[in-house]
Amino acid sequence: MLTYKRISADVLFTVQIALALISGGSEFLRLLTTSQGVSLTWLASWLIFLLINLALTLRAHRLGPSRVTSQTVLTYGAWTTVIAACLGALLWHGTELWDGKDTLTVILVALGLTLTGFIAYRLGLGLADPLVHAGVAACFIGLPQLILASKIFTVGGEGMAGLMLLAGHIGICTRLGQLWFAIREAGWDRNRLGAALGESANEVTWLLVTLAWLVR
């Protein structure tokens, strides 16, 4: 990789790690005070989404190891750790861990997974196919965030730290940037394409969550 590209990739990686610490840290502290508007199923689904993309980037790294692909793996590892910590804080300190919107989230995710499986079957794709993983990831991140936006708009979003929202957007865009650098360096493959599709669904629905928080 050319020097300027390597520097750009390193900057994106540093930003990602900083954002994970700032975003996760601010939300962790907020959840120790209030969990208003924060959904248990949202955090749990986000954690599953991150684990899926971590698996995709690990697979891509094994197929074509490089500095950039290792940074992408470490990025998803960092975000996975902080979201797991936030989920732990909610389980420990949350007062209303489950409501009707959590039930609705579970139903929608189940329907989305069923539809994804049906489409994969009709296209002759195995469950291990990266594009199927992308559909599963989108179900676990996109649908819960739609319900989260509805919940924040209905009951308020005191449990959502402003830094979490801002860092979320910057984080998604820089992760997409990391994937773009990895694609330019090693070329397109189904693992990177799957991760990029999942992150795109993440950004679109996170915009709706942010809008609900701002309006509320």
Image (cartoon, rainbow, N blue to C red):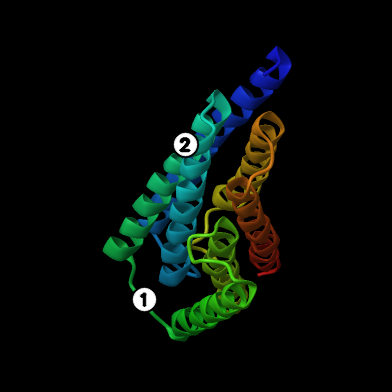
* Disc nearer the start of the sequence (2/1): 2
Residue drawn at x 47%, y 36% as measured from the top left: 62
Task: Say what amino acid the circle numbered 1 marks.
Answer: Glu
107, above or below 97, in the image: below
- Image check: 63 left or right of 194? left
Q: Nearer the viewer, residue 23 or 58?
A: 58
Q: Percent from the top left, x then y, of residue 60? A: 53, 41
Task: Say what amino acid the circle numbered 2 marks.
Answer: Arg
44, above or below 68, in the image: below
- Image check: 176 left or right of 60? right
Badge 1: how crowded within 10 Å, few (<14), some, or many (20+)?
Answer: some
**Residue 181 sits in quarter:** top right
Residue drawn at x 68%, y 23% as measured from the top left: 8
Q: Percent from the top left, x then y, of residue 172? A: 63, 47
Q: Nearer the viewer, residue 82 or 185?
A: 185
Quarter of the image with the N terminus is top right
Q: Nearer the viewer, residue 22 or 14?
A: 14
Quarter of the image with the C terminus is bottom right
Badge 2: how crowded within 10 Å, few (<14), some, or many (20+)?
Answer: few
Q: Is residue 22 visible?
A: no
Q: Is residue 70 visible?
A: yes
Mark identifier at residue 77: none
Q: Percent from the top left, x then y, of residue 98? A: 38, 79
Residue drawn at x 27%, y 62% as measured from the top left: 92
The residue beneath circle 2 is 62
The residue beneath circle 1 is 96
Specify the farthest residue to the left.
Answer: 92
Q: CA distance from mark 2 to mark 1?
A: 42 Å
